[in-house]
Image (cartoon, rainbow, N blue to C red):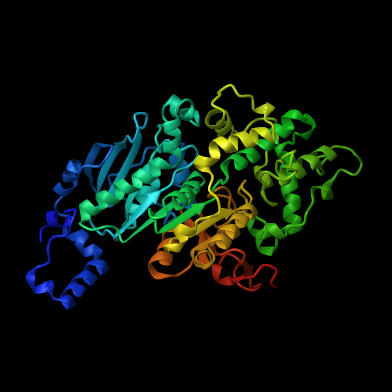
Amino acid sequence: MSCQDLRMPHPAPLPAPCLRRPCRRAMAGALLAAPLMVAGACAAQAAGCSDLARHVLPDATFTTVETVKAGSWHAPQDQLSHIMSTPGMNLAGHPTEAANPTFCRVAMTLHPTADSHIRTEVWLPLKGWNGRLLGVGNFGWAGSLMYDGMATGLSEGYAVASTDTGHDSATPEGQGGRFTLGHPEKMIDYAYRADHLMTVAAKALVKTFYGHEATHAYWIGCSLGGLEGLIEAKRYPEDYDGIVAGAPPNPIVSFNAEQLWAGWMSYHDPALRVSHDKFRLLNTAVMNACAGPVGKKQGFVDEPDRCTFRPEQILCRTGANTANCLTADEVRAARNIYQGPVDPQTHTVIFPGPAKGSEYGFSADGKAFPVALDLFRYAAFQNPDWDWTTLKWDTDIQDATRKIGPLLHVDDNLTPFLARGGRLLLYIGWNDGHNPQQLASYYQAVQRHAGAAGHDGVRLITIPGMEHCHGGAGCDTFSKLGAIDNWVSHGQAPDMIVAARVDEGKIVRTRPLCAWPAVARYNGQGDMDDARSFACVPPGAN
C-alpha cells in the first residue's frame, strides 16, 4: 500500500486473504494501536503535503501549503508570544519549548459569510503522529494564531489547529474589540463560528492526510480560550472528546463588569482610590493572618477560601494615614473590591471580587480596565464614545447581557457533551482576578445538571499562588495535554496532578494540584519543595 493510498478519504479495500473476520479484527487492531507506524511510513513522501492544496473545503481558500523542516519554525515575537512561551502556559508542562519536528503546514482563510475572514492553520506531523487532534484556544480578544501552543502540541505528536477567530489584531481595526463595531457576522465568528469551522476543517484534513480520522480530539485554552472551550462543549458537543478550560470568564458580561468595578468606584469617589503600596500592605497582612508554613515560605495563601481576615484589622486607630495601616476609606475600598459590584435592584452580587491573597493585583485608580471596557463600548453598545463612568449597574448590565449573552454566555447544561463521554477539566489560580469560588459554583451546577455523567466527566483544579492562567508564586506548570489524554484515552481522572514552579528554565519545586474541593496538605516533615511531601485531603482535614 502506498503513502498516497493511506491519504485517500476512504481506506482502500482489504486484500482478499483478510476478508475473514479474525483477520479483519487483527488489522483493525493494528491500525488503532500503531498510528505512529502508519504516519511514519508516509513521512518520506513530502509531496503528500502539497497534495492537500487540491483538497476541497467548503468556504475555504488555501494561502500556504508547505513542508516545514525540523527545527526551522520560529513563532513571531510579540506580546502574545511572550505570554504563551512562559512555562506556565506550556500545554505539555515543559520548562522550555522543544524544536519542532517536520510537519505539513496548511494555512487557509475561512469565509462562511461575505464579511468573514478567518485565518486558520492546521499542522500535521510527517512522522510520529499519535492519532489525535488538538485545537488551541485563544487569549484576550484573540486576533492572532496561537503558534506557541501549536508548536507544543506538534512536538507531542498531535495534529494541531488554531484560528484568529476572524480578525487581525495587528491592524488598527482588529485591536481589542473594535472589529465588532458594525460587523455582526464578525462577532458571530469570534463567539463560536470560527472555532467550530476550524475544527471541522482540521478533522477533514487529518482524515485526508492520514487516511483515517483522529481517534480523539482535544481542546485546550485559558482565559478566552477557556471560554471558547465551554462554548464548544455547549454548542458543538461532538467536536471534542476532551476540553481543558482554564479560568473561563463566564458569564463574560458579569465578569467584565467586575473588572470595571474598582475603577468605576474610585472614579466616582476619589476617597476610595488606593495606592499600590497600600494594597501591598494589605497583602502582607493577609499573608500573615492566613498563610500556612508552606505558603509563608513560598509566598502565597495556601487555602484562600478559609481565610477570615478582614481589612478592618489593620485600620488606622488614631485616624492618621500612615504607611502601616489603612484609613477608613481604604478599608471600605478593599471591602468593595472583595465583594464585587452589586445590582442595585436585586441587591445581589453581579460577580464576586478576587480571593484573599491576590491583593498585589488590585487597582483602584479611577481608570477603566481596557479589555473589559471594549466589551461594553464596542460589542454590546456599538458606541466607541460610550462613557464607562455612566455605567448603570442594573440596566446597563442587563442590556449588555441581552445582547452578548446569547453569543458568549454558557449555562450549566453541558449534559449532551458529558453524556456522550466528553471530559471537561476546569482550572484556575487562587491569585487570579477571577475568584475560583465563582468557578467552583459553576462546576457544581454543571455536575448537578448532568447527574452521573457530570460526576464522572468534570473536574476542577484550583491552584494556590497562581495568577491569571500562569505566573505568581505557586506551581503553575503542568501538562494539560497529559491530564486530558490520560482521562479520555485511559480513564484516569485527574484527581491529582503534579505541577512545578520553573525559574530560568529549571524546576525549583513541585506540588500536587488536587481536584476541588480537596486540597494539598503538607505532611509536616518532608521537603516543602517536593510534591511527595503533600497529600490531597478533604478541606478542613488535619
Tell me if residue 20 comes above or below residue 335 in the rendering.
Answer: below
Task: Quadrant for the N terminus, please.
Answer: bottom left
In this view of the protein, which residue sits in the foreground, 159 or 444?
444
Instruction: Name the foreground residue: 527 vs 440.
Output: 440
Instruction: Left or right? Give the position of 158 relative to 18.
Output: right
Which residue appears farthest toward the right when viewing the image?
318
Residue 152 position, x and y percent, is: 37, 52
Q: Residue at x 59, y 39 (%)?
A: 253
In the rendered view, would you say 484 is above or below 490?
Answer: above
Give the side of residue 144 with respect to residue 474, left or right.
left
Residue 208, image x and y in percent?
Answer: 21, 51
Q: Does the rendering let one see residue 169?
A: no
In percent of width and height, residue 534 lies at 59, 70
**Can you see residue 439?**
yes
**Residue toward you, 122 or 348:** 348
**What is the residue that sits farthest to the left in this orientation?**
16
Q: Position of residue 119 (x, y in %)?
A: 34, 37
Residue lying at 67% horizontally and 60% vertically, measured from the top left: 303
What is the tally of numbered marks visible in this picture?
0
Up the image or down, 85 lies above or below 76; here it is: below
Q: Quadrant of the C terminus?
A: bottom right
Q: Is residue 101 left or right of residue 293?
A: left
The residue furthest top is 385
